[in-house]
Amino acid sequence: MTYSYFPGCTLKTKGKDLDIWGRASAEALGFTLEELPDWQCCGAVYPMARDEIATKLSSVRALMAAGEKGQALVTLCSACHHVIKRVNNDLRTDEAIRDKVARYLKLETPYAGETDVLHYLEVLRDKIGFDKLKEKVVNPLTGRKIGAYYGCMLLRPAQEMGFDDPENPTILEDFIRAIGAEPVIYARRNECCGGYCTIKDKGFATKQVDAIMDNAKACGAEELITACPLCLYNLKENATEGLPVAYFTELLAEALGVKEAAK
Amino acid sequence: MQRVGVFVCWCGSNIAATVDVEKVAEVLAKEPGVVFSTNYQYMCSQAGQEMIQESIRKYNLTGVVICSCSPRMHENTFRKTCEKAGLNPYMVEIANIREQCSWIHKDKDTATEKAIILGRAAIAKVHLNAPLTAGTSPVKKRALVIGGGIAGIQTALDIADAGFDVDIVEKEPTIGGKMTQIDKTFPTLDCAACILTPKMVDAAQNERIHIYSYSEVSSVRGFVGNFKVTIKKKARFVDETKCTGCGLCTEKCPQKKVPNLFNLGLDNRRAIYIPFAQAVPKVATIDADYCTMLKSGKCGVCSKVCTAGAIDYQQKDAFIEQEYGAIVVATGFNPIKLDKYDEFAYSQSPDVVTSLEFERLMNAAGPTGGTLLRPSDGQHPHTIVFVQCVGSRCDDSKGKPYCSKICCMYTAKHAMLCREKYPDTDVYVFYIDVRTPGKNFDEFYRRAVEEYGVHYVKGMVGKVVPENGKLKVQASDLIGNQQLHIDADMVVLAAAIEPDKSARPLATMLTASMDTNDFFTEAHPKLRPVESPTAGIFLSGACQGPKDIPETVAQASAAAAKVIGLLNKDHLICNPCTATPDEMMCNGCSSCEKVCPYGAITYIDKEFRGPNRTTLIRRVAQVNPAVCQGCGACTVACPSGAMDLKGFSNKQIMAEVDAICR
């Protein structure tokens, strides 16, 4: 199976580990991520203003490029996923936006959200299946107590993202179980990491991250995984005394033996 | 051809606002056989009914078509009307132009066209109607009540009081239901046990009431007046006739680590147990999942200590057959499971409890002897947060769309009792709305706020984080427009209530309808609230919808009144629309016999005259009209088209279809 792949800017710079191990693991699992040619910025933040169309256009271009190939569009960065998925939903459901976008891009047939947008984790859960993933694990991470950190981007707004229950998500815990480790459930796993506030008010981000870390530690977690570059940044940089944090793809590669092979 | 009269009803504006009733009457007047056609504001009113009767006499009508509401609403009314004017009641047809037409359409022209078509179909059918005469069937003068909570007990007491025998089937080892677990009752704060246990004793001592405890209904056959029910008496491994309820076995049993379900698992009991001191019947039961003797054959302590010799490890499930005239469903409710609401940390901390668990923690017979203590460390809590609507009024698939109705009042009760018994506690209640529509209910809630100083906060709790022995509660205060952070010692969740899990399979057995939430549906939401649409099945208590105790008892007595009315009759008029086989077409295949849910079809070998004065014996179907309920399953199953339903014959249905397609 081949999917169109939208890496996004961070995965080419600060978040390389998320990208590299994601692609390598995909091959081991029997699917290919085909990077879209000439992809542009996803828009970075989903525009909340109803009449703001221009910042949605680059997402639409990526969606259409995947659609032309007849492929679903897979993302790894949770911020890109959030923006692209919501823009796609707008074009699927809002005729006025669809019409304006068609005029901007001079489309003969308006794009109506036909392309499916999948996060890498959704591919693992819904296309590959965690039970199948478990079978492919050569290096089970037995005995490791891992806390999943979800953040907000993948989960909310739940009706549009359709990813998991925003209050009690399980997808990352199921993933942790599949790679042979023990998931640690802690209450603050979907609380805010501080997000972009870290630029303006580092103290606030530190307060958020410390609360998350303390909670995870108290529940017995020894390390955390996440799918979000911004969450990873905050958890790593702003914690007073934090646990090790890694992208989920890194542990996936480790469990599949891909990481070892790369060395 | 019949002489047909057509009567088009306006139903005030219900029909007339969307359907041009005058035009319908006018067009239908031109249909073949129609000798009179009119319209009227309220056909079901006395004036309307008299107009129908006059027209029958004046125009010598032999068939009547009424274009009005659903036949479920007024078919009987109009049948009686016409019968009084000398017409056979089965010569009346209803064209439903309200529920199936005016209520669901907006455009008047298309609705009018559809009403005409529906009327035309009814006229086509009435031409083929034949007068039918109803027979009668006897009524078995005994009632069955399924569920022995306060609803079932009250219904049984009232039926017995009227002089009829009544059986209660209760799946637990004791009757009493949820009310036995409740501490105090709103709005009077009298103790639940004090008002319930005398009723339980009354039921046990009443010679007309028989209690089948630890039993379930395993099958139901028959129909109103003649139900045949099999009751499964589950093996409790104790001979009820010998056990004196002394309780010695429950003290000596070495298996001490069995979660005590009566206290919702907050403490442990033994493998042999009596749920609580006032249980009825006060008889021990062995929990087969935990008893070492039953599992491995090694132990037998209870048998050794029992002076009455009541322990019987060999006891098997017993099945009892009984006949009933009426069945009352009183299967009650349960709080929902909270696994989908873990943002409130129910699975993460023992100090997060449900309201029913809180009842046990406040109850003198509960695990803490009535002193409110935190389950985690046995300490006295100082700050308690109550969260309302957990799983109620949800717009997603996680919870229930309805209001559970009782939570606002019991939460006010809990908050008030906390403040009264422990004035040093700080009590918060988070709510969406406070709903108190009941006698003396709002006064009760206001007392909690004004006299007892409970902090009522409009807003919801977003997250509960167990941390360093505290529960960190994050919530919104909508009126203060701020976020609240409260360090609580306990959090109490008002979990939504849902029908008991046994209700769904029971409804299938009884062919009683349910709504999408598995509550039993009443025959009419306003006018027949205690009857199921299935004849002879009555509804009592929370199985029909969320209810508090006063409402449950009122409905229980109402259901009893309906049962008494039914059992008072010696005979019931049968439905004459029964199946009849055409013996010449029947090939004896048994298809109909297999699908008949009432066992009304048998086969006989019958002698027929063959060609050249020969005789031949053929196997043909026979229908017992006293048992047949006219469901029509056999007419569809019959491969040779031999089976027909009186009043709904294949010819009549085809005539309707033809009229619609014309």
Image (tube, rainbow, N blue to C red):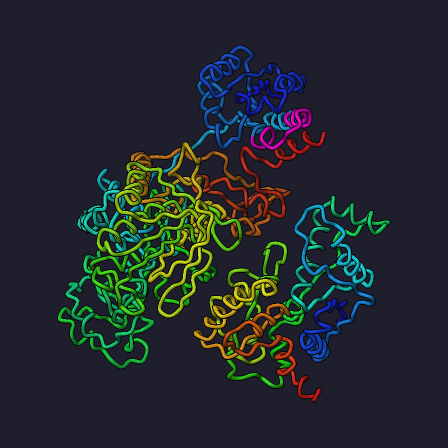
Identify the residue at image location x=25%, y=60%. Answer: B372
- Position of the N terminus of chain A by quadrant: bottom right
Percent x, y for residue A90? Answer: 70, 51
At 25% from the left and 74% from the top, the residue drawn is: B256
Residue B110: in magenta span: yes
Taking the image as shown, residue B97 lies to the left or right of residue B195, namely right
- The residue at the point 41 percent across, 32 percent down is B527
Residue B169 image position (x, y, % from top left) = 31, 53
Residue B644 seen in the current view = yes
The residue lying toward the viewer, choosing from A167 and B464, is: B464
Instruction: Determine whether A59 is above or below A244 in the image.
Output: above
Per the picture, the main secondary structure of the magenta-coloured stretch is: helix
Asked whether residue B329 is in view, the answer is no
Single out the residue that lies furthest toward the left.
Answer: B307
Q: Is residue B278 above or below residue B17?
A: below
Q: Is residue A8 magenta?
A: no
From the viewer's perspective, is residue B461 above or below residue B38? below
Residue shown at the point (82%, 47%) measured from the top left:
A103
Q: Provide residue B274's location: percent of width, then percent of height.
A: 22, 64
Front-lying residue, B523 or B365? B365
Q: Which residues are magenta?
A: B99-115
Q: Nearest the camera: B569 or B94? A: B94
- Residue A153: percent from left, percent from top: 61, 62
Name which quarter of the figure residue A22 lies in: bottom right
